[in-house]
Amino acid sequence: MKEKTKNIYTVILCSLVFFSIVIANFLTPYKEYSDAERRYLSKMPKLTIENILNNSWTSDFEKYTQDQFFQREFFRKIKAYSSYNIFHNLDNNGLYHVNGFLSKIEYPSNEYMWQHATDLFNKISSELFDETNKIYYSIIPDKNYYLARNSGYLYLDYSKCFNFLREHLLTMQEIEIADLLKLEDFYYTDTHWKQQNLEKIILKFAESMNFKISTSFVEKSLDVDFYGVYVGQSALNFPAEKINYLTNKVIENAKVSYLTDNGYIQKEMYDFNKAYGKDGYQFFLSGNQAIITIENETCETNKELIIFRDSFGSSLSALFTEGYKKITIVDVRYINSTALKDYISNTGQDVLFLYSTLLINNSLSLK
């Protein structure tokens, strides 16, 4: 009898817990965006006959319930802590940390993505430029190139990737920078590299592309705590970092214009307002922008440069300023390459395709 009573109480207690969670989830306000993870959360899927028949509604609803769960951030922290410290997993949802560096596993290698990227680069090159242009490309290894390989984690086949690009970008001159970088050149908790460590990189480009950098850079620091994108994704606590940046009179006096729906507007090279926003790295060239121009009226030559880039180029592009009369910075994630003829005319500019392995291995955002 006591056993039966115990079982009844157990069932009642479990039922109360279950229905309490259901009610709490029902009463939890819908949240569109996760500031911690820097991504949009799943919406309630529309219930249609087609979605039911192809089973997409079930999977979409599962994602919705996971994203809109009651006290989701609290349970994310518990899961992450348990994964690392109780079950001793090497990673949690692909995120891992070694010696203070936090990163996300980039694996496996995706040749389809490489092909998509190189096809687009060659298409842009052939449609917009000709033999009057000097065309270069440079690939930025992601942090895993220096971290995962020496720590026992999976990583993409970098040698195979670099060789694939060489074989498919035959009309472009490669500028290799992988050996110039080291792990300490990247933020501890973010994907990106530190601009204050990139003077050696810009000097490599100056030598390879035959432009001049003679004005010394001055390093300054922002009075703001910076937490990289991986901190929110990991749901764990990591120390804040600082954003340091390089400047000089050439950079400070340059005219910087950003393409908007209403045409170009003039802004600063470094966006101090965004430094205090959700993603401090957007301090560099205001983050994601379709087209930016940098004009240097004090340039000793009439050389111009066009840079096709991803977010890594945001911090590096400013350092090219002294070497060119005009620099046009293009991000074909935010403007379709077929529309570039309306904004770019061939006047014999130097051209640089500057992309990270993260983007090359996930290139469908390029259009």
Image (cartoon, helix red, strand yellow):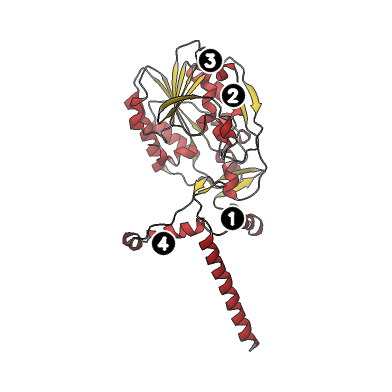
Q: Position of residue 171 (x, y in %)?
A: 38, 26
Q: Secondary structure at mark 4?
A: helix
What amino acid is at disc 3? Lys
Q: Is residue 193 left or right of residue 133?
A: right
Q: Quadrant of the N terminus?
A: bottom right
Residue on which disc 2 sits: 199
Within 10 Å of disc 3 (Cα), the crowding (few <14, some 14-19, many 20+) is some
Q: CA distance from mark 3 to mark 1?
A: 50 Å
How many C-alpha atoms fall within 10 Å of the one at disc 2: few (<14), some, or many (≥20)?
A: some
Looking at marks 2 and 4 on the same chain, the residue that comes earlier in the sequence is marked by 4
Residue closest to the far top: 300
Q: Residue 204's mark?
A: none
The residue located at (37%, 25%) in the rendering is 343
- Classify the position of the C terminus by image quarter: top left
CB atoms of marks 1 and 4 within 8 Å: no
Please provide percent x and percent y for residue 109: 46, 44
Position of residue 103 measured from the top left corner of the image (x, y, whole percent) = 58, 44
Residue 58 visible in the current orientation: yes
